[in-house]
Image (tube, grey):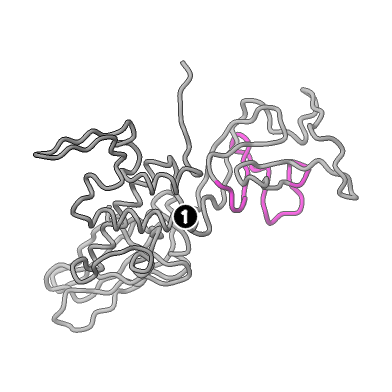
């Protein structure tokens, strides 16, 4: 799957190379995960002799990170030809200009294309080490209730649009009256959905709602499936993650990256001998970067 690097609020243009004898190219863009139709149009061609057509992805399409399916239809004197391609639309953790600003890189040797490739490598390494990503997504997540007034989500919650209880819509952000019966808020930690049990003067009646088998109002029912549709992730890339990305890119461009910041415990010379510490081959490979990312790391484990 090819990757497009987007910018918030900016359109994105790319080149689609059509088959021989093409006279025009039409396209339709879909969200690959939701199958939602996003936009369509006709590719722009600079000269009739060229087979390269410019495809424009509108700002509404590029406003957050998503996977795309694009259907292309090429017309020619001998008929029509259809093709489907898949793309990842991703906000980089550090732009080329920021990498040059933050890192010590010889730009006479390392091109902008090389920096984009190394940023992707650094970003994937950061995601693997931390256990999460710093993208902004409009998706549906599923969790299970436990007879409490809160749901914990495995991601930052930016906005809640809909909540479904066993596939039945119980909350719509744009509706004043919802089946839950109480306001729904995002917690300060950004990873919990909280039902606020209030009176008309906005004073909380009790911290944990009273419930019974006859009255489940104000709670997320035990073992019920709750699907939450909305925006998740990060509105922005944190400064320390951006710094870590730039440092990793710099690290990749160094000739001595195999030993630099690797946690070497012992070094001998005369056809030398290296001894690495316990953390020499863990994390991103760079201790300075690992320290910058330590506050975000999620430790996942299984209890047997």
Residue 127 to residue 207: above or below: below
The residue that mark 1 highlights is 240
Side of 204 relative to 7 (left or right) = right
Side of 119 relative to 302 (left or right) = left
Residue occupying the far right of the picture: 201
Residue occupying the far left of the picture: 271
Toward the viewer: 17 or 300?
A: 300
Toward the viewer: 145 or 266?
A: 266
Which element carries disc 1, helix, strand or loop?
helix
- Disc 1 crowd rating (10 Å Cα; few below 14, some 14-19, many 20+) is some
Residue 177 to residue 236: above or below: above
Q: Residue at x 89, y 49 (%)?
A: 200
Q: Residue at x 42, y 49 (%)?
A: 33
Please identify the quarter of the rendering in which residue 218 is found: top right
Q: Is residue 163 magenta?
A: yes
Please identify the quarter of the rendering in which residue 26 is found: bottom left
Q: Residue at x 47, y 59 (%)?
A: 64
Side of 197 relative to 125 (left or right) = right
Q: Is residue 28 magenta?
A: no
Label total for image: 1
Picture coordinates of residue 188 (x, y %)?
67, 47
- The magenta stretch is 156-183
Residue occupying the far top of the picture: 304
Please identify the quarter of the rendering in which residue 101 is found: bottom left
Picture coordinates of residue 17 (x, y %)?
19, 68
Picture coordinates of residue 42 (x, y %)?
32, 74
Toward the viewer: 256 or 296?
A: 256
Picture coordinates of residue 268 (x, y %)?
18, 37
Q: Residue at x 25, y 35 (%)?
A: 266
């Amino acid at each position: 799957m090819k990757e497009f690097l987007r910018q918030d609020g900016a359109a994105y243009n790319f080149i689609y190379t059509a088959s021989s004898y093409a006279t025009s190219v039409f396209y339709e863009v879909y969200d690959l995960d939701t199958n939602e139709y996003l936009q369509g149009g006709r590719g722009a061609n600079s000269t009739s002799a060229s087979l390269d057509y410019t495809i424009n992805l509108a700002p509404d399409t590029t406003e957050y990170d998503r996977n795309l399916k694009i259907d292309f239809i090429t017309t020619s004197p001998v008929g029509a030809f259809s093709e489907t391609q898949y793309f990842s639309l991703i906000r980089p953790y550090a732009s080329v200009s920021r990498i040059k600003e933050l890192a010590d890189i010889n730009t006479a040797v390392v091109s902008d294309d090389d920096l984009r490739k190394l940023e992707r490598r650094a970003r994937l390494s950061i995601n693997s080490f931390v256990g999460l990503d710093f993208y902004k997504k409009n998706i549906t997540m599923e969790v299970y209730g436990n007879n409490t007034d809160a749901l914990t989500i495995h991601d930052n919650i930016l906005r809640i649009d809909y909540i479904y209880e066993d596939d039945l819509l119980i909350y719509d952000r744009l509706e004043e009256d919802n089946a839950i019966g109480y306001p729904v808020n995002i917690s300060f930690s950004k990873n919990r959905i909280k039902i606020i049990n209030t009176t008309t003067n906005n004073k909380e009646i009790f911290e944990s709602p009273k419930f019974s088998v006859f009255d489940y109002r104000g709670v997320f029912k035990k073992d019920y499936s709750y699907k939450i549709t909305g925006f998740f992730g990060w509105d922005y890339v944190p400064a320390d993650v951006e710094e870590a990305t730039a440092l990793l890119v710099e690290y990749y461009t160094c000739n001595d990256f195999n030993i630099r910041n690797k946690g070497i415990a012992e070094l001998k010379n005369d056809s030398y001998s290296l001894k690495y510490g316990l953390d020499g081959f863990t994390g991103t490979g760079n201790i300075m970067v690992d320290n910058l990312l330590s506050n975000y790391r999620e430790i996942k484990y299984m209890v047997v």
